Amino acid sequence: MTIKFKNRSFFTFLTLFFSFSTLSLSVSDHFDGDYSPNNNMPSKSGGQWVLLQSSIGISAMHMQVLNNDKVIIFDRTDMGPSNLSLPIDKCRKEGDVGQLDCTAHSVLYDIASNTFRPLLLQTDTWCSSGAVLSDGTLVQTGGYNVGDRVIRLFTPCNNEGCDWVELSKNLWDRRWYASNQILPDNRIIVVGGRRVFTYEFYPKIDSLSSSLYLRFLIETRDPGEENNLYPFLHLLPDGNLFIFANRRSILFDYINNKLVKEFPVIPGNDKRNYPSTGSSILLPVKLSAGSDGNGTAVLPDAEVMVCGGAPAGAFIKSDKESVYVEASRTCGRLKVTDKYPVWSMEFMPMPRVMSDMLLLPSGDVIIINGASNGTAGWEDAVGPNLNPVLYSPDEEEPDRRFVVLNPSKIPRMYHSSAVVLPDGRILVGGSNPHRRYNFTAYPYPTDLSLEAFHPHYLDPENAYMRPSILSLESIGRTVSYNEVLSVTFELSSYSPSGEISVSLMTPSFTTHSFAMNQRLVVLNVVSVSQLSVYAYKVVVNGPPTATVAPPGYYMMFVVHAGIPSHAVWVKVTWN
């Protein structure tokens, strides 16, 4: 379906009717599982939405969960004053004009207390990127204008003293709409950006005097539309980097600046990267106890999933003609570790553009936010997708993998974001499809609120199935490579048919529908034993290599019959 308006201000009634009536789907038509305490099976519902804050003063364009249970949230700085004042002694000058701005464009959100405080950004972070180092420090790169080469750090602290720090050394190239990936050696690779066809590292490599050219980035750029910004990056278990842009993808050896192979083009006419914004994840990496003849651990399979986007030419139609073409309905899965990988295509229940894809601790995938028609960009989409979708990658029947969940009441369009919290909720915020904050725009005003979506595993009916981690037999909550590790947990009702698993999840840096660095590593279970009426112990093997799980902070979940515990933070490290 294509929606066309001669005048953007005219689309109010039709858009509201289409988005709220047509796309707010009834969950009762999609769920057939009822809670039954007698069969020890978890309840499945459509989830629940909870409004956390009606306004945090800024729109959540970027979000990152930190290892002290805080979430750093920030917008751009060049859109004028926000709705949150900085402390009285803190102001900044905006851009080349030097206009004084005493409002905040970043906040630090406390998960436990549901409170937030303002942070001070000095330069523009518009459409930037980030990754977290092994010590928990967020490295945030690029942005716009004088901020487009800036490197910013935020180090978590347990008081009110921590704030953004901008480094004096800049990036080699401007990084606006670039992507970041943490690497096994604790470096960060920064790839692409608008009219930039290179990659570089943080920290800089002393032997390099410039960034490195990557031909793939210019080859995937569509004239007039681009469709290769915010390329999808996934670190694979063999240490190479999967890079996806537009419709193409490659396996890249970033150490030797070498193209290892190019994968098949994803089928169809749909473009997948900004502004035809789809999303991508690395599906859960499942470890086993297997080894080769020399005793070396066998690397796990790796499979990438790409969903949503928009047809070729959709951005030009929406941006220049106010014609909003139906978004992509397809998802593609590619097992990149196969000798001859082939895309496996599936259809979502509805078309989606600008949706966030997040791994859940249960091993499922949630697709949330976005629109049904148009593309990313100012005023370039209509028809909000109010209903999240749950995708179960291990479901054998393809037509049962997608399940439509309960709708939000708040459209989350361009410049919205979402992250997974340690308690399993999804934190959702943002939406500002306008050049500046516009609270009277109809039907999609700038939104400054924060919501939490509670997936079915948080239903009260599932409390008796939910594990609670009691202890971790390690020093300082560390997990070493190849370590044998014991986790003690309690459980009110153990289901004999319910599998026990232990997973490590990296918190993502989410912006523009891409959860950078997100990773779910399912550890190999050696044994499960019962210690008392309600206490159990699970013994697992730690990750085999840093290419499987780069050093750093992870959320550890114990999962029973698909119901995850509240996470505890652990640090994956060398012995």
Image (spheres, rainbow, N blue to C red):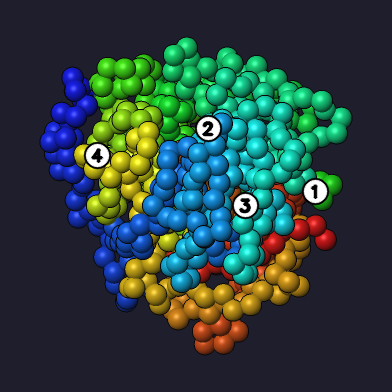
Q: Quadrant of the C terminus?
A: bottom right
Name the secondary structure under disc 2: loop
Name the secondary structure under disc 1: loop
Disc nearer the start of the sequence (1/4): 1
Spatial separation of the CA atoms under disc 2 and disc 1: 59 Å
Disc nearer the start of the sequence (3/1): 3
In this image, 414 relative to 192: left or right?
Answer: left
Q: Position of residue 174 (x, y in %)?
A: 63, 28
Q: Position of residue 394 (x, y in %)?
A: 46, 48
Residue under numbered circle 1: 296
Residue under numbered circle 4: 441
Disc nearer the start of the sequence (2/4): 2
- The answer to whether residue 38 is above or below residue 542 is below
The amino acid marked with disc number 3 is Trp
Of residues 228 and 61, the one drawn nearer to the viewer in this rendering: 61
Identify the residue shown where x is 55% and y is 42%.
93
Name the secondary structure under disc 3: loop
| Residue neighbourhood size for the residue with mark 2, other residues' Cα within 10 Å, grouped as few (<14), some (14–19), many (≥20) | few
Disc nearer the start of the sequence (2/3): 2
Q: Position of residue 70 (x, y in %)?
A: 54, 62
Identify the residue shown where x is 63% and y is 69%.
158
Identify the residue shown where x is 22% and y is 26%.
8
Q: Is residue 357 visible?
A: no
Disc nearer the start of the sequence (2/1): 2
Quadrant location of residue 219?
Answer: top right
Q: Position of residue 473 (x, y in %)?
A: 71, 75
Q: Is residue 440 visible?
A: yes
Residue under numbered circle 2: 97
Residue under numbered circle 3: 164
**Disc 2 vs disc 4: which is toward the camera?**
2
